[in-house]
Image: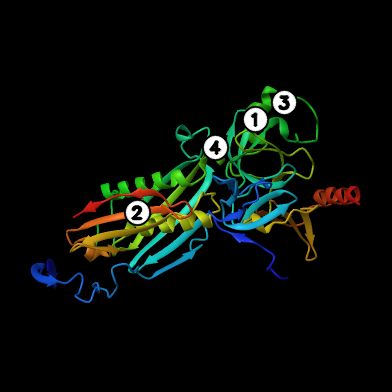
Amino acid sequence: VHFTVFYRGFDSSPSIMPVEFISPEGLRLDGRRFNELRKVSCKLGVVSKADGSAYVEQGNTKAIVTVYGPREVIRKAQAEHDRAIINCEFGMASFSAMHRKKSGRPDRRGIEMARLIQQTFEAVVMTQLFPRTQIDIFVQILQSDGGQLGACMNATTLALIDAGVPMRDYVCSVHAGCIENTPLLDINHQESMAHGPDMPVAVLPRSGKICLIQMDAR
Amino acid sequence: MSFAHLQIVTPGEVITTDTSFLRGHGTYTGSSGELIASVAGVVERVNKLLTVRPLRSRYVGEIGDIVIGRVIEVLPKKWRMDIHARQDGILMLSAINLPGGVQRRRTVSDEMNMRSFFQEGDLVSCEVQQFYQDGSMSLHTRSLKYGKLDNGVLVAVTPSLIKRSKTHFQMLPCGVHVLLGNNGYIWVSPPLPEAAAVMEADDAAAA
């Protein structure tokens, strides 16, 4: 049996309660089985001004991605003579997590997420077709309940498709975890905080190639 | 109009495994020679050439297209124009019509007074002359019907809505002159007498 620390009410005094991540019948906290995904919904073209945009909901995690480009490089020194460069900026809205974040400079985790998304799509987007251009990807998390990187990858794929940027394949991504020796698919925030691993995986479905795999543990 | 004959594909979808087809835009070849789509769009086939036309895209030009560009920067002997394409268009000083229609070599004083022709922010209608190696477009205004646009309204739409036709200069029955740029920029202005004369000459030549 796992224990987790809950902050109760407004006085921030911790209270310890036992939490059953997997019930004896095999149900998780939100009623899913170990290999069930959360409800997914997506919309393309939500930002009309951008070349491409997508909004993805995976359970309670909501991400919106806008794509600009390929377009003329803004900083000439960064231009590559034989391919397009991909810039990615990641941000979490101040209202997206449990506690309000004073949004200021992008924090280290945001820079790391942006770098991961950029590296993944540099391998998938056919950048050699557009020399001397740049593709800008702006990722924003509107609500976070676990699986942020996965939702961002899926939303970025859809936004790039909406923008008409040539790609080898879709990038499909989900998070996996393991609690009480049971592997779990598409973990939410509570499950990722349960002292088990949080493993985002991104694959190209047609070839089955893995383009991102990472493991965090709290 | 039925759309049942249109084949819509998304990236990663195999279009055909027949290796005799030629690969066009929007496709790439897989490991065993099959043709795979790289964009989401409609498959178009011309004889043995297969292309996928994306549903949405920036302006991809062809030589002879009429485009409306906005001057971004004045460089030595050329202007850089925003034409809503993947790269900015270049309008060379040697490719414009000098005022008065005079044909002469560009002098040093022309180079020094480039802003007297076009300044940053001006809208210019021009034609695509050729493509550079990296895919950017070289533009020209070597006809009286092209040149700086003033006294009107610019409407920007997606380039895929503009169909290629013989005349892009249109006069609407309500007395409004419309210039449909292939790059999705549309210029709406009151009718101009000299533009009307050029259009008539064009129609006579085409007929």
Residue annotated with mark 2: A201
State the separation of the CA atoms marked 1 and 2: 59 Å
Q: Report the residue at 68% width, 31% height from top.
A: B93
SS state under label 2: strand
Residue annotated with mark 3: B106
Image position of B62 (left or right of A82): right
Amino acid type, residue under disc 2 in the picture:
Val
Q: Which residue does the image show at 38% across and 53% down from the upper left?
A: A202
- The label on residue A131 is 4
User: Which chain does the numbered disc 1 sit on?
Assistant: B
Cα separation between marks 4 and 1: 32 Å
The residue under the point 65% across, 56% down is B43
- What amino acid is labelled 1 in the image? Asn
Q: Secondary structure at mark 3?
A: loop
CB atoms of marks 4 and 1 within 8 Å: no
* Snapshot colouring: rainbow
Q: Is residue A22 above or below residue B106?
A: below
Of the numbered discs 1 and 3, the one sitting upstream in the chain is: 3
